[in-house]
Image (cartoon, rainbow, N blue to C red):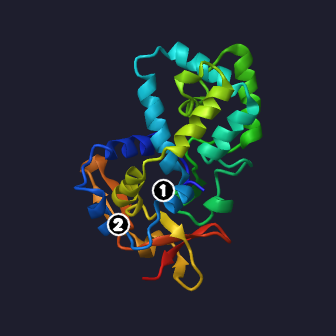
Amino acid sequence: MKKILLSVSVALLFASCTDLSMSNEEALNVDLPNDFKWQDYAEINKDVKASQVLFKIQEEKKGLPSSEINSNCAGVLSDEDFASEIYIGFAGCPEAAWNREDHCSGIYAGNDDYNILEADGAWTCNIGSCWSEGWDAVADTLQKYASTGKTDFAPFNMMCMYISPQAKGSPQIAKSYLDEEIKNLDSTLIKKHYFLIGQSEGRPYKYCEQGSYGEQRNREYHALKLRGGSGQDDRIFYDYSKNLFCLNKSDEKIYLVNK
């Protein structure tokens, strides 16, 4: 599950958190739920750990020409098995196709992070940088682009974000890099992510336990509607921070934690 999905904006927002100071980890722990476990939070919200890796790769790419970056990524993504690991595993994109002009299904069903109500009253299933045609369509398009040398393909650019320039076009090196970085997660940064971002977004911080959770998360009842900006720049934000939420493994949906 994502939040289950990574987006550039989330990654950059997470990166900015590293500049926000906490007095020390003990002080941070006081402000977290008593049963908060950073390992569970990172496992449930896969984009949190992916963001740390992505930020490091972003730093490595600074100053490199785009042609070199694209060539490196094209070489790595020519390995379809590894490309699918990035697309489905790291980015959390659905393997199967889905209908954008409808409610989301599967782990995204009932999750208002992805089910968007448009102004005309219609629903849209919007899952980040993923293609609604599913992985098979992405894989076919990757192969066509590889043969022509083109790189102006949205899923290609998204997956390229996970590929270190150290790979030099080698899928094996790219995979080893990601595996090693995932082992070196910074627990304090993960705690900060929940404290600064996750709780206000209504992210599940743990798995639900029998008898300790209530109704399914609902933006109308569980979030505070806030307005920011002015005039034409008005934006609506939803703050869930007055409540705590968990993920139910049996149906992969988010529920209110009974305090």
Residue 178: where, in percent of width, then height? 58, 37
Visible in this render: residue 241? yes
Q: What kind of residue is marked 2?
A: Lys
* Secondary structure at numbered mark 2: strand
* Secondary structure at numbered mark 1: loop
Q: Height in image: 32 above or below 190? A: below
Q: Residues within 10 Å of mark 2 (few under 14, many from 20)?
A: few
Q: Height in image: 24 above or below 81? A: below
Which residue is nearer to you in this view: 105 or 244? 244
229 horizontally vs 165: left or right: left
Q: Which residue is disc 1 drawn over? A: 119
241 horizontally vs 41: left or right: left
Residue at x 64% of width, y 61% of height: 107
Closer to us: mark 1 or mark 2?
2
Residue at x 65% of width, y 46% of height: 89
Which residue is nearer to you in this view: 224 or 30? 30
Residue 225's tag is: 2
Residue at x 71% of width, y 14% of height: 148
In three-dimensional space, the C-alpha distance between marks 1 and 2, rounded to whole angstroms, equals 17 Å
Instruction: Give whichever of discs 1 and 2 has the lower sequence position.
Output: 1
Residue 12: where, in percent of width, then height? 39, 40
Residue at x 68% of width, y 49% of height: 94
Residue 29: where, in percent of width, then height? 33, 65
Q: Quadrant of the N terminus?
A: bottom right
CB under 8 Å between discs 1 and 2: no
Q: Quadrant of the C terminus?
A: bottom left
249 horizontally vs 49: left or right: right
Residue 191's tag is: none
Residue 110: where, in percent of width, then height? 59, 66
